[in-house]
Image (cartoon, rainbow, N blue to C red):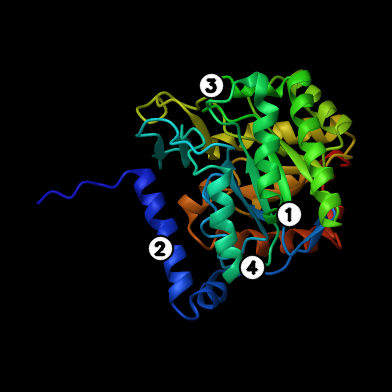
Amino acid sequence: MVILPLSSETMHALVMKQIRIRSTYIPGYRSLLKLMYGSPTVPTDCFGIHFDNPVGLAAGMDKKGENVPNWESLGFGWIEIGGITLHGQDGNPKPRMFRSTKHNALINRMGFNNPGSEQMVENLAKQKSKKWASIPVGVNLGKSKITPNEEAEQDYAGTMERLWGFADLFVVNVSSPNTPNLRDLQAGSELDRILTACNEVNSRMAQAAAANPKPILVKVSPDLSDEQLKTVADSAIAQGCAGIVATNTTTSRPADDKIMGQSGGLSGKPLQKRSTEVIHLLYEHTAGNLPIVGVGGISDSESAWEKIAAGASLLQFYSALVFEGPGVSKAINKGLNRKLKTHGYQSLSQAVGHAHRS
């Protein structure tokens, strides 16, 4: 009998299901995971939120938000679920996720496959009624494929309104390469329109809840020119955004082989250099006044420290969890504490952007 290897997407779904089932039905399972993989604290504050450590799970891993209460057991200091769109959609045709062990990279062209904002409200409410995360939860907002760019602000703002009560922060994703023409929304006027609509919803929901508005961040593409990146940063500041997520996946390729020939967004090790360059640029352009979440090629404490030195206040990864395993968050945070001690910093915030001061 020939046993065919599972596709990357099938394996991903099985792992997500196993984490959810075991954490829900096996007594003490979360505690066991935390004992094995729990991280030391590397406390920091950003966007008015406290983080026990800066290491976050990037959007795309828990697209449906099915493991919201479970990620902290693997050492994460915060998570970002989604992307979530106003309308449910199947995403792009399969196969649409590929793994390159040669390059420590993933390629995906998922296309915001998700159950949609209305179903997500039901799913998350069910989870929250039983157990919820004690770490900050971000929600990645995408645009439905059926929604024309001219009406994009309705999509983002509509999803934000429905999910407002479940999020500690929101990330406006206008940089995925897997939805046609989505990246056009990074242009100044287009982005302004989306952020204006989201700000209006944010203010209204906060007033109704007698609470503070939720931080809104913008996620940028590494494939933008330096001038385009500066324009996005200027729009984010003008609209009162809390920060920028740098960066999304790239359409560029480090090599020409069978896997690298697949279309879609590339993440992992090959993205490390460019994402760090973008962080450097944005930190310098904003004089360090706009917090940056560093994403792209983080796999150990060295690559994490590189992002912090460039100007990242918080971190995220996805691919490293695939290639390095569940202990990677713990290893990174232990390494960050060593770095802080070696360099004489009393806190992580003191270390942010130190490459610009040397």
Secondary structure at badge 2 equals: helix
- Mark 4–mark 2 contact, CB under 8 Å? no
Disc 1: which residue: 168
Query: Residue 197 vs residue 261: left or right?
Result: right
Nearer to us of marks 1 and 4 is 1
Identify the residue at the far bottom of this view. 27
Tell me where residue 96 appears, x and y as whole percent: 40, 34
Tell me where residue 130 appears, x and y as whole percent: 57, 71
| Above or below: residue 144 compared with residue 79 | above
Query: Residue 83 vs residue 226: left or right?
Result: left
Disc 3: which residue: 180
Q: Amino acid at mark 4?
A: Ser
Mark 1 surroundings within 10 Å by alpha-carbon count, few (fewer than 14), some (14 through 19), many (20 or more): many
Secondary structure at badge 4 equals: loop
Q: Give the label on residue 18, or none.
A: 2
Mark 3 or mark 4, which has the lower sequence index? 4
Secondary structure at badge 1 equals: loop
- For marks 3 and 4, give the CA distance: 39 Å
Q: Give the label on residue 229, or none.
A: none
Disc 4: which residue: 39
